[in-house]
Amino acid sequence: MVTVNGRSYAAPRQPTVVICVDGCEPDYIAQAVATGLMPTMRRWLRDGTALIADCVVPSFTNPNNLSIVTGAPPSVHGICGNYLFDTATGTEVMMNDPKWLRAPTLLAALADDGATVAVVTAKDKLRRLLGHKMRGICFSSEQADQVTEADNGISDVLPLVGMPVPDVYSAELSEFVFAAGVKLLATRRPDVLYLSTTDYVQHKHAPGDPDANRFYAMFDRYLTELDAAGAVIAVTADHGMNAKVRLDASPNVIYLQDAIDAWLGAGRSRVILPITDPYVVHHGALGSFATIYMPADAIDEARRRLVATPGIEVVLPRDEAAARFELPADRIGDLVVVSERSVVLGTSVSRHDLSQLELPLRSHGGISEQRVPLVLNRRIEALDARRRWRNFDAFELALNHAQ
């Protein structure tokens, strides 16, 4: 038994696999299952445990992956976006460095307790955070050709997996994660395996789209192999995904920096988009969550105007936002803004190059992308139907109840 961030977890008695399918709106699974493309998932939904859970808001990749592996919200682990404004240095930075982590991961704790642990993630931006202080295997699809025993706990990944390094903008980047998981389970037999994909397909294709269904059919084939190997498996997601378009299919964007500059004057505020990462083809750095830094005497006026803006769902001052969304108050702005289901937030028109976007724009970040699947291949009896299940309950269910 190990205790991490106030939660206790039993040691795995069988190989345990937790999978975070990036951008997996529950309807993706429903559409693929309905058309007969996910027979293994269909069986789990019938004979295993099938829940709908809430991810953390902002519904972005880094906060939710770290919540899953810490069993805690961002108020505990500190990762409140892919990107933040560092008030200590006055700069905007990516939150890829483990220095931003404020809590230990369950993965590291299990390894310290004697379990063998392996992590495979699609993009390298997550690898250092997920593998922080963890003894074991940890590598990304994106840099699978650069692994070393010293840095990643493994070498020669490409011959093991039998695939070349995939393009970062491809479904194969995620398939490499699944294929690596199957090979690691067959050859290394880790006690705990965490797999995290990319949402390239989900940003491009809606549930039920032929390309989306092909992705989930592929996913199901790897689930079949993991299941046949005798693993306890939990599948969840970091966030959902929605179309963010007008009736003419153009991106439905509210440019917050331009609006606030017009209301209050230029240079009186700084809008931060925590979705920002290097992979702009996915979303153009447009998501449904933003945080704004501004002088105290401007907050009430800005909030009043934002609340009255069509397409805005929630505008909260710092302390209210931190409490509602379980965020570290010192790492968010004076106002937090969440847009409605079909709307994204930008900074200024001049700062977003949308030429690489493939319409219609699909993105995430808001409350409307909070519902995600939480499915296990083992039936767990007598679960509390009144409990608010979270994606970061995946390891608790897999280790404490499904063994």
Image (cartoon, rainbow, N blue to C red):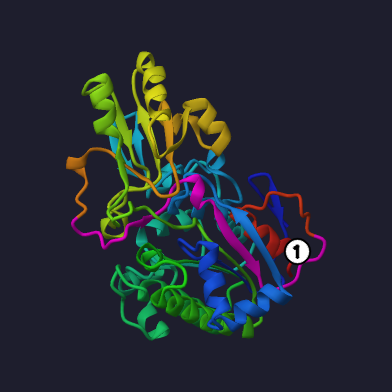
Which residue is labeled 1 in the image? 401
Q: Residue at x 21, y 23 (%)?
A: 266
Residue 176 appearing in the image = no
Q: Quadrant of residue 392?
A: bottom right
Q: Camera-side residue: 107 or 113?
A: 107
Q: Quadrant of residue 145?
A: bottom left
Q: Does 229 sit above or below residue 125?
A: below
Q: Position of residue 111 (x, y in %)?
A: 59, 61
Q: In terms of secondary structure, where does tag 1 sit? A: loop
| Most frequent secondary structure within the magenta stretch | loop
Q: Residue at x 44, y 76 (%)?
A: 215
Q: Does 263 sit above or below residue 94?
A: above
Q: Camera-side residue: 90 or 279?
A: 279
Outermost front residue: 247
Looking at the image, residue 12 sits to the left or right of residue 314; the answer is: right
- Point out the stretch of residues depicted in magenta: 355-382
Q: Camera-side residue: 136 or 261?
A: 261
Residue 397 appearing in the image = yes
Q: Residue at x 28, y 56 (%)?
A: 248
Report the amino acid beneath label 1. His
Q: Residue at x 34, y 53 (%)?
A: 245
